[in-house]
Image: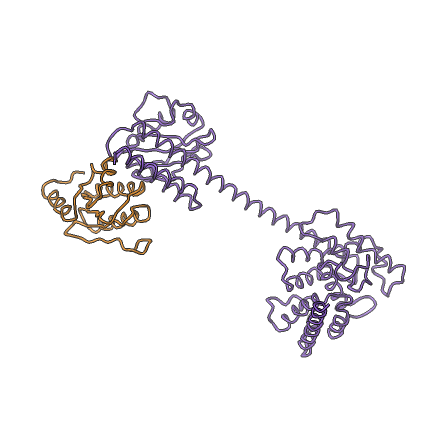
Amino acid sequence: MEPSTQKLIHTFGALADLGQEIAGTGDFNEMVRTSMHMLLGTLALRRGAVVECTPGGPLKCAALWGLSDHMFDGFEIDDIEKQSFLQGETSELLVKNTAVPNSFMGRHRDKLAAEGIELVLPMIVRGEVTGLVLLGGKASGEEFSSDDFETIRAMVRHIGVGIHTHRLLEQLAQRAEENRRLYDELRAIYRDTVRAFAAAIDIKDKYTQGHSERVGKYSEIIAREMGWCEEEVEGIQIAGYLHDIGKLIVDRDIINAPYNIDAKNSSELNRHPAAGYEILAPINHPYADIPLMAKYHHERLDGRGYPDGLTDEQIPLGAKIVSLADSFDAMTTDRPYRRRRSFEDVVRDLRENSGKQFDGKVVTAFARALMKEVKGEAKERRITKMLGKGYLEGEQIPTLLNDLISDLEDVSRKGAKAQSNS
Amino acid sequence: MDTPSGKLVRSHCVGTTAVVYASDYLNKLTGEKIEHECRRQLNCGCRALVIDFSDTKLVNSIGVSILLGIIDIAEKCGARIAFSEVNNETVQLFEMLGLTRHVVLAKDEREALINLSHYETTTPVVH
């Protein structure tokens, strides 16, 4: 094989390897180091370095071979010196050639020559000097030929673009991380604001303080038990906090009436789900369907609910969850006109109203979550804590819950069978 | 010594000369292992290195750079290097790139060892 052909094959091979290295997604420092080795190995150079420009001027060594480890300590390149590279007639500068005016070379020529650097090339990407490549010590002892310059220029362009691309990707990743952090902060602010709202709603009703907060938490627990994703769980918790926001427009005396209210006042009170929707709909919530969950949290599966008298399939699942959480809290807390009901009584109500007022699947999920706490299988006993000491204690509790779960599962199985038969 | 492919970088010593065997393709992965082994042998007191290329079909640009690095290290230690059983194409490459100015090329390991021992007794290493 002719030596020139051999050289061409070696150079092409190196360019192909360099392209692959630069396009890779591996470690940045390793990429620069390997790229520099490829450049040195293509022309059998014994010394080389790739240095990056940094804001403020200092040059940062990205890869170094055959040179003193700290040779670039204190090396700087200022804007005027960068300009002198951009304005130069050739992209490469021979250290020994003092005739070519270049302020950077003027300042560092002696040190570069002392280290055996013979050639300095700027890495120019999009009209900007992003770094320098410094080379020297051809193993052949020959001068650099015009072919060598062509090869070096091509490879330095590749390396420059590679470094620039990696830096851009790093910046993008940094910005994405920053955006994620900001987004998380915004969500935290949103959640805190919503909780403050929930507290404001509950303050209006002196008998149900903490109700919205508890409904939010019960809704979250049910949704998690039903296998909802984290985003959806957060959303329904917010819906729980805000489900009664419409009560802000209801007269305080009606809310705080210490007895069962009459039909007129009841109708006034029943406006709150639709009013809540009106308040929440114009807001751009980070979670889906919050206004609808507030609007339909008093709908019933049998169509006897309000405001729209929707039936089973028409009611969003989120609203069914909030509805159960709301009713459960109402049954398990004292009201002006009654004491809270016993757990046995509550379970009876849930069983009787499953399929009428409540969705059986939602009740089953809540019963399962309760069971986990009773059995000590839950990480935290959050429901128990909200219900207060003693409420969920008693030998009959697991049996009550077990019976409720199996009854509801039985109904669900029968329903599914009937549906498949029809 | 393990290579990434699980093979060993074979080496042995003859007096103060270490013989290190290069693998079939001298690239970044295998080259760095060979460089490491050469450094280790020099640190252990070897004063000459034979790198045997009998299994080597191809040397790429990184391979060349790493070999130059080994030459540098050896020179700094005052050690000599010989390359043995290099195939014709690789000899052409090494000649064209000027590596042969810094190493002795030998037809086989035995000839390399003789050349290096002759050099040791007749030519003092100058730093």
Horizontally, residue B33 falls left or right of residue A200, namely left
Return the residue found at the far left. B122
Q: Residue at x 43, y 27 (%)?
A: A82
Based on the displayed image, in which of its 4 quarters is residue A346 positioned?
Answer: bottom right
**From what the image shows, is residue A83 above or below residue B54?**
above
Q: Position of residue A42 (x, y in %)?
A: 31, 37
Based on the displayed image, in which of its 4 quarters is residue A414 positioned?
Answer: bottom right
Horizontally, residue B120 falls left or right of residue A79, namely left
Q: Position of residue B72 (x, y in %)?
A: 24, 41
Q: In which quadrant will I find the N terminus of chain A? A: top left
**From what the image shows, is residue B53 above or below residue A61?**
below
- Coloration mode: by chain
Q: Which chain is orange?
A: B
Q: In which quadrant will I find the C terminus of chain A? A: bottom right
Q: Residue at x 27, y 42 (%)?
A: B69
Return the residue found at the far front. A422
Q: Position of residue A399 (x, y in %)?
A: 68, 77
Q: Residue at x 85, y 62 (%)?
A: A257
Q: Position of residue A278 (x, y in %)?
A: 79, 50
Horizontally, residue B114 falls left or right of residue B34, namely left
Return the residue found at the far top. A99
- Chain A colour is purple
Q: Residue at x 14, y 47 (%)?
A: B113
Q: Nearer the viewer, residue B81 or A397?
A: B81
**From what the image shows, is residue A6 above or below residue A250?**
above
